[in-house]
Image (tube, helix red, strand yellow):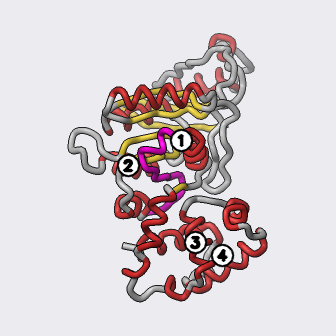
Amino acid sequence: MVVRITRMEGELGIEVYDDGVGFDPAAGEAGEAGGGLGGLADRIAALGGALDLESAPTPARGCARRFQRGSARLPDGPLRVVIAEDHYLVREGVRALLEDSGEVEVVAAVSTAVELLDAVAELAPDGVLTDIRMPPGHHMEGIDAAHRIRAEHPNVGVVVLSQHADEGYAFALLKDGTAGLAYLLKDRIGDLDELLRALREVCAGRSALDARVVDALVERRGRRARSGLDELTPRELEVLREMARGKTNSGIAEALFLSESAVEKHISAIFAKLGQAGEPHLHRRVAAVLAFLQESQ
């Protein structure tokens, strides 16, 4: 169950999402004195307010959300996603592609960052798929919106799409933390499996980074100045690159044909060389990826 409290002019809104089947508000108001919804209505009335109930018996929509970063679980049903893209044909094409997969329910498709923020606030989706450049400025509205969404709605993951394999954009997106964020090149739209994987990752509170962006970062390692990254072995750099792509230890092991124990040893060595040995595991992992991104500028 998720309880969301919002404050508006003269009103306090309490929204409860669960995996039940709803109820009849008229029946819900009845009950023992001082208890249940009836008792809550009486207490609110005593303060000069009113309790309005909006519910109806309906099948569960898989509205369970994660409770903490790092311990998230995906909803039982399709991911509820908002799309933001200013080109109509691209927007509707992506909508059709995702919905035809059976794994995504597109709850809104908008064309501006302002409309995106409004849709997220109103619909509470599991995730967002947004272009990096949108009206009015066609600059980095998608990244700015992603930061605001993660700050105001930490249960919502965001995948940012860009036409540019420019690590500067990726760093701008991930500079304040990687949880619940992904950066993909726009031509990944044609790779449904990759697109769905990124959505699942961010909706579970993890991150993903396009492989070609990671490759660009690796190629520019020569521009690093003084950094603990210089001390990493080629194999440790490979492991760190896979970490930057958002992969788990088992995913790294599979990609590099290593055992999970070997991956764990390499990651421990990376943490030690980057001076993060004493930090919590999740913080160390995020810090290592950020160091990799920042020092590649």
> What residue sits 39% from the left and 35% below the top?
84
Dot 3: few (<14), some (14–19), or many (≥20) neighbours within 10 Å?
A: many
Chain-order first, disc 4 or disc 1? 1
Q: Earlier in the sequence, mark 1 or mark 3?
A: 1
Whether residue 180 appears in magenta in the rendering, the answer is: yes
Q: CA distance from mark 4 to mark 1?
A: 30 Å
Residues marked 1 and 2 touching at CB (< 8 Å): no
In the image, residue 174 above or below residue 235: above
Nearest-to-viewer mark from 4 and 2: 2
Q: Which residue is denoted by mark 3 in the rendering?
A: 240
Magenta stretch: give its range. 176-190
Identify the residue position indicated by label 1 in the image.
Answer: 191
What crowding class fits label 1: few (fewer than 14 Cα within 10 Å), some (14-19), or many (20 or more)?
Answer: few
Classify the position of the C terminus by image quarter: bottom left
Q: Amino acid at mark 4?
A: Ile
Q: Quadrant of the N terminus?
A: top right
Task: Specify the label residue 147 is tagged with.
Answer: none
- Which residue has dot 2 on it? 162
**Residue at 75% across, 75% down:** 262
> In terms of image quadrants, where is residue 31?
top right
